[in-house]
Image (cartoon, helix red, strand yellow):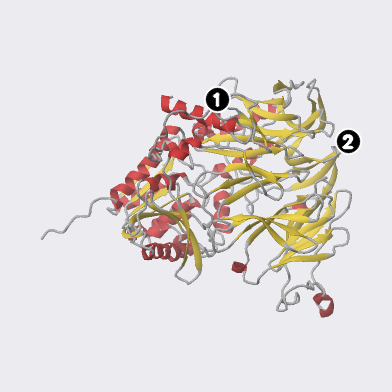
Amino acid sequence: MSTPLRFALVVAAIALVGVGAGAQTPPAATAAPQAAPAPSVFTADDMLNVVTASVLDLSDDGRFAAVSTRRTRDNADTDNRRYGDPTYLSPSAVRLLVIETENGRTQVPLADLSDIRQAAWSHDGRRLAILQVVRPGAASEWAVRLRVWDRERAALLDVPLKGEAGVAVNSGLDWSPDDRRLVVSLRSKVRDAEARARFKALTEGPVIVQNAKEPFLEWDDLNRASRWRAIAEVDVTTGAVRAVLPERKLISYSLARDGSFLTFQEDITEKTDYDVIGGSDAVLKQVAMAGGEPKTIVEAKDLKGLTLRWSDDGRTFAYAKKGEVFVQRIDEARPRSLTPPPPQKDGAKAAEVVAKDAPADAKDPRDEKESFAVGPISRDGAKLVITSKKGWYVVDLATAARTQVVTLEADEEKNPRMDAVAWAPDGASVFVTWSARDRWERGFARLDVATKAMTPLVRDARLYGGARFARTGGRVVFSISDGDRPADLYASPADFSSPTRLTDLNPWMAAKALPTSELVSYRDADGKVLYGVLRYPVGVEKGKRYPTVFELYETFFDNGFNARAAFLATHGYAVFHPSVNLVVGRPGEAWVKGVTAAANRLIAMGVADPDRLGVHGTSYGGYATVLLLTQTDRFKAAINVSGKVDMVSFYTDSPRLGVRNTHAPEKSQDRIGGTLWEYPERYLDSSAILHADRITTPLLCITGDQDPNVPASQSREIYYALRRLGKEVEWVRYVNGAHRPPSNAGESVDVEQRILAWYDKYLKAEKKTPAA
C-alpha cells in the first residue's frame, strides 16, 4: 500500500471514530493560516475509495445504532466463476461501528474489517449480537461465527454453538424477550456438501444431462438449496442449542414480539415457475417456541404472489390482492376484506364509500373500481394505512371503517411523491417521505390522522433516505446527501429537529473537485414532460459548450453521488441522465424520442456541443444504447457495458438465473409484452443486431466472460457484425469478470480509463480544417 493511501485511510478511520459532538478537538494551531490547496482531480482509482454506510440495527430506545461501512476497494476481488454456488460467498468486508445517536460518539467492536451479515440489539440495548463470516482457510471456505458485544464493557465474546450444525449464512438474528437467548437458523454440513457437489457437476461434468421432464430447471433447483434450514434457540452464555423447528425449506421467518411463536413461509414449490423470477409456492405457518407441530395459517394457493404487511406484535398481517385489501390474525381461519367492491346494482350503497370530504368532482365508485395498496399497520395493530389513486385512507381493522386522510389529484403528475414509512408509537400520526414532482424539494412530513394535516418536518433540496425510527418513537436515524457527494448518517428527535451528524465517511473527498448537478425538464417527441439529471463539468464556464455524454437506463429524477459521472465531469464532460417514456410492445421508440429530445434541450441551454455527443449504458442501459444507435447518427461515440443486442438469442440464455431472461421480455423490464412465439416481430424490431448496418457511431463494448445475466456472446455478435460491415468497433473482455465486468481493483480502474479514453478519442479530438 502506498504511503499517501495509507495516510488517507488513517485519516478516514480517525474521522469515523471521532465524529459528533462527543469528539475531542485538537489544540488550536499556532502556525500562520495558509491558503487552502486547490481541489485535486477525482480519479478512477478514487472511485474505489468511496465509503457508504448501512444501519444494521437501532436499539429500541434509539440511543445506539449498529452501522456497517463499506468501501468498494475492500470488496473488489470476486471469483465470478462461482456464481450460483450456494456454498460460495463473495467478499463483504465492512467496518462495524456502534454510534451513540445523541452525540455521535463512536465505538469500534472489531478492530479489523470483517464480514458482518447481521447485527441485532438486545431489548435493553446493552448487548449487540453479531453474525460474522470467517474464512479460516482458503478464500472459498467459510464459517459463521455467533458473537455478542457488551457495550458497557466494550467486550466481544464468542458464543460456542454445541452440536454439528452451524449458523446459516442467511440466518436471521433475534433476541428472546429476556435477552438470554438468540434465535437463529442452522444449516447442516451435509446440505452444504450436497450443494457443492451439485454445483461442481453442473459446471465441470464430465457429462451433463438435462431433461425437460425434470420438474425444475437444474440451476433453479440448485438456487433453492440455501433454503434448507432449521430454527433453534442458542443460550448466549453456554452455547446450548434447543431445536424449535426441524430442517425444511424456509423462505423467511419471523419471531413474535413477545417471543412465544414463530411464523414462517415454507417453500413447497413443485416445479419451475415461468411467471415469476425465482417464483415459489409457499405455505404460511406458525410454530410455538416451546415446540410442537406447526400450524398452517395460509395455504400456498391463497398465498401466491402476495406481499404481507405485519403488525409489530407479529399477530396480524394485511395484503392487497387484485386491488382489494385483506387482513387476518394468525388465530383466524380466513382473511377479512377491508375494501369489498361496491355493490353493482344498488347505486345508493355504492355512493356511500365516497369519502365525505372528497372533492366535488370525485368520480362515483360505480364508474371505476378503486384499487388499493397496503401501507404500515399501527403499533397497536388497530389501524392500517391503505392507498389508491384517489387518496390515502386509515382503516380500523376491527370494523373496516375507512377514513380518507389524503386526497389526491386525478392527474398523478400533480401529486407529490409520498410514502408512508412508519406510525408514531401513539397511533396519532404517520411519518411520510415527501418530494415534489417538478423540482428538488424533498424531506419528511407528519400526517395527523385526526386533523388530516400534513406537516413538513424537514424539506429542502437535499436528498434524504433510509429513515429508521426507534421503537419507542423518540429518535430517528437517516441519511443526507447534498446530491453531489456521498451521503452520511444523521440522527435527530422524531420530528427531525436539531439533527446530529453521526458519520464523516469520506473526509478525503473534501479536497476533490466534484461536479454540481441540476434537474432539467424537457419534452420528448410525443410532447410528454420528462426529467433528467445534469452533472456539469468541473470548473464549468458560463457560455461555453462542452462534450456531453448521456448515461441511459430508464427514468431519472433524484440526483445523488455518481462515481463515473464525477470522474467524467472532472475531465471536462457534461454528463446527463435522461428519462424516457417506455411503452410495452414498442420499447425501442422511447430511446430515440426521449434521448434526442434531451440532447436538444441541453444544446438549447448552451451546455452541450451538438458535434460532441456521446452515449453509454450498462446492462439494460447498454441494450438501450446500441438500439438507439440504429435509429440516429447524432452521437459520435458510444459504449455498451454488458448490454444485450439480440433479443432472440438472449431469450433463453441465462441458465444460472433460472427464468430471468424469458421473464424480462415477456413480463418485466424489456417490455416486449409476450413470448417469442406470440410476438416474433417485436423481438426482431428490438434486436439491434438486425439493424447493425444502420449504425455509424463508433462503438466500444465491455463485457465479462463470466456474466450470468447478459452473456458476453451478445457483444460478440455486435462486434463481429460491425466489423463485417466495416464499422468502427472495439470489444474489451474481462475473462474473469461478470455483469459488472471488473473482478478486481485493477480491472475496475482499467474499465473507467478505457471509457474516458474512448470519449477523449472521438469527442475531444481536434477537428480537421478542410484543405483550401
Query: At x 73% / y 78%, what residue is drawn?
Result: 360
In the image, 742 versus 448, the foreground residue is 448
In the image, 30 versus 566, the foreground residue is 30
Q: Position of residue 610 (x, y in %)?
A: 32, 61
In the image, 771 versus 453, the foreground residue is 453
Q: Secondary structure at mark 1?
A: loop
- Whether residue 438 is visible, yes or no, is yes
Query: At x 73% / y 53%, what residue is drawn?
Result: 304
How many numbered discs? Answer: 2
Tell me the number on the disc at residue 608.
none
Image position of 564 with respect to 160: above or below? below
324 left or right of 624 in image: right
Q: Amino acid at mark 2?
A: Gly
Q: Position of residue 495 (x, y in %)?
A: 71, 50
661 left or right of 403 in image: left
Label 2: few (<14), some (14–19) or many (≥20) C-alpha neighbours in 10 Å: few
User: In the figure, residue 373 lies in which quadrant?
Assistant: bottom right
Q: Position of residue 709 (x, y in %)?
A: 51, 45
Q: Amino acid at mark 1?
A: Ala
> In front: mark 2 or mark 1?
1
Q: Are marks 2 and 1 in contact (CB under 8 Å)?
A: no
Looking at marks 2 and 1 on the same chain, the residue that comes earlier in the sequence is marked by 1
572 left or right of 489 in image: left
Residue at image mark 2: 292
- Whether residue 586 is visible, yes or no, is no
Residue at image mark 1: 139
- Between marks 2 and 1, how big is the CA–CA gap? 40 Å
- Looking at the rendering, in which quadrant would you find the C terminus? bottom left
User: In the figure, residue 669 lies in which quadrant?
Assistant: bottom right
